[in-house]
Image: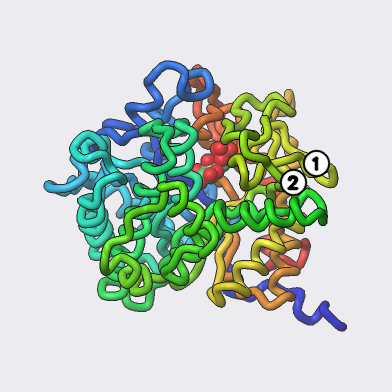
């Protein structure tokens, strides 16, 4: 097989980087913005690493021009960002805040002026606090209309300028944290409420995809899914069954609902038995089938390895948010599965397994099951970075991570996967939701810590590396 002929990335491949509003913008109450659930939650004692919050973040709101100039210098072809719902609708619905829209006009126009394709995420977790207070946010079906109205407002404003859209970012990860682990707002720990809210989020996702077809002809939309492919710890049938359970409960529960408009069989049967299954009303599944995505956004960081978990065994546990390696406990659902370390893989300081082959496996599984194009909407390495005496950041470990994962993308394309692009997480350093400012992901270092800083931008070694990869169209990989 002469694979070298197919090694080139397509010429229109979207070499990108990503961010999310709350993690970069700051300006949390500027120009009429209302509070999001994160503006409130992060101020409660003990919720985030050293009480860090996004009031200032990396001040992207006031430094858009500088940041986009850095993207242009790097040669980025795409920039994925999210719109803050409470900037547009301070109360979640009702009066639109023109100043909020004007900020995204500036960002999008500046990207386009530099030849950078905007990839717009409609929802990256910053729900207007007003809707949480009024009816419990994702737990009430009223959110479907309010979310649609917000999304249509953005469709109408940006349809001519933005081709690539992401509906919900990591519904799976966000709602698992919000309603099972209690680590994201509204910090509930109740599996029945979790599955109910999650079902309503599927309906909202389908509704806005349906509306998209009318308002953004020629555009492409899909959710971004946090895909951690499951591995079995061994070929013991009990481990294989645990792996099947984990893949179905932690991945296919979302992916099948998005792409097939149905829930996977064994998981649904189990939840009906335990009384935790969501209420499916007449018309719900029809709506899901009318609102399937054009492509799947894939946020890939690591694989998870599963083993048998007896009844009375390990329950769901919180992850390491300190960067003290080896402090993440095993987590699972008794009777179904639990995680176990993979002895074949190195991990980051936050215990995330580093597994480029897992990315190839992820892309192949998704492409072959759903037959849709894919876009890597996030992939990257969170680490402690050091600004050295020479005023530089030598993040060779990040270069190694990104290099190996881009090679895996290339191999997946050779395997037949249609991959639209790759957005590294993240462009600049950002606020990590629970891990503060010390867990850095960017190509651009931002001089700030939990206490603050000058917010000066400094290009890391990885910036120059990605710049040359993009310039070569991937040939230097
Ligand atoms: C994803 C989120 C991102 C980003 C990333 C890194 O779950 O969509 O917003 O935060 O993970 O995660 P963390 O910041 O926890 O390291």
Q: Is residue 267 above or below residue 217?
A: above
Query: Is residue 353 toward the left or the right of residue 210 in the image?
Result: right
Residue 245 location in percent, x, y?
62, 54
Are dots 2 and 1 in contact, CB under 8 Å?
A: yes
Q: Which mark is residue 346?
A: 1
Query: Is residue 206 toward the left or the right of residue 178 in the image?
Result: left
Which quadrant does the N terminus fall into?
Answer: bottom right
Residue 385 location in percent, x, y?
68, 31
Q: Nearer the viewer, residue 260 or 367?
A: 260
Q: What color scheme is it?
A: rainbow
Residue 15 location in percent, x, y?
59, 62
Q: CA distance from mark 2 to mark 1?
A: 6 Å
Q: Which residue is mark 2?
A: 354
- Which residue is at a point 26% across and 35% down the rendered structure image? 129
Density class for disc 2 (Cα within 10 Å; few <14, some 14-19, many ≥20) is many
Q: Is residue 165 above or below residue 123?
A: below
Quadrant field for ligand 1: top right
| Residue 115 shows in the view | no
| Residue 162 shows in the view | yes
Q: Nearer the viewer, residue 24 or 471?
A: 24
Q: Which mark is residue 166?
A: none
Q: Is residue 46 above or below residue 81?
A: above
- Which residue is at a point 31% across and 69% down the rendered structure image? 287
């Amino acid at each position: 097989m002469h694979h070298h002929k197919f090694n080139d990335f397509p010429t229109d491949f979207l070499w990108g980087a990503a961010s999310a509003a709350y993690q970069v913008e700051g300006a949390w109450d500027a120009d009429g913005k209302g509070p999001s659930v994160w503006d409130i939650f992060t101020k409660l004692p003990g919720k985030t690493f050293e009480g860090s919050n996004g009031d200032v973040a990396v001040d992207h709101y006031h430094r858009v021009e500088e940041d986009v100039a850095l993207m242009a210098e790097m040669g980025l072809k795409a920039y994925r960002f999210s719109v803050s719902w409470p900037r547009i609708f301070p109360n979640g619905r009702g009066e639109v805040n023109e100043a909020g829209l004007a900020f995204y006009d500036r960002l999008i126009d500046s990207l386009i002026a530099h030849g950078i394709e905007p990839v717009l995420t409609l929802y990256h977790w910053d729900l207007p606090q007003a809707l949480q207070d009024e009816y419990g946010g994702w737990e009430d079906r009223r959110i479907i209309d309010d979310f649609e109205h917000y999304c249509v407002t953005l469709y109408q404003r940006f349809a001519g300028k933005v081709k690539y859209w992401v509906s919900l970012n990591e519904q799976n990860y966000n709602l698992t944290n919000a309603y099972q682990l209690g680590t994201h707002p509204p910090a509930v720990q109740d599996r029945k409420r979790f599955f109910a809210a999650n079902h309503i989020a599927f309906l909202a996702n389908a509704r806005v995809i349906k509306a998209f077809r009318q308002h953004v002809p020629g555009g492409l939309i899909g959710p971004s899914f946090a895909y951690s492919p499951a591995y079995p710890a061994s070929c013991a049938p009990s481990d294989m069954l645990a792996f099947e359970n984990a893949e179905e409960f932690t991945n296919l529960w979302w992916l099948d609902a998005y792409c097939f408009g149905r829930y996977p069989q064994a998981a649904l049967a189990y939840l009906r038995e335990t009384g935790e299954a969501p209420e499916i009303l007449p018309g719900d599944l029809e709506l899901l089938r009318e609102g399937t995505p054009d492509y799947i956004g894939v946020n890939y960081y690591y694989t998870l390895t599963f083993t048998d978990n007896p009844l009375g065994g390990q329950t769901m546990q919180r992850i390491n948010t300190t960067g003290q390696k080896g402090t993440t406990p095993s987590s699972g659902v008794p009777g179904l599965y639990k995680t176990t370390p993979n002895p074949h893989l190195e991990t980051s300081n936050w215990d995330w397994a580093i597994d480029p082959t897992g990315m190839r496996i992820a892309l192949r599984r998704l492409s072959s099951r759903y037959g849709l194009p894919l876009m890597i909407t996030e992939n990257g390495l969170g680490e402690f970075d050091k600004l050295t005496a020479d005023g530089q950041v030598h993040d060779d470990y990040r270069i190694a991570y990104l290099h190996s994962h881009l090679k895996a993308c290339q191999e997946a394309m050779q395997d037949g996967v249609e991959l639209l692009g790759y957005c590294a997480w993240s462009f600049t350093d950002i606020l990590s939701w629970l891990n503060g400012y010390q867990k850095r992901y960017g190509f651009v270092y931002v001089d700030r810590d939990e206490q603050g800083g000058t917010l000066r931008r400094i290009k890391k070694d990885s910036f120059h590396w990605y710049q040359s990869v993009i310039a070569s169209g991937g040939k230097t990989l």
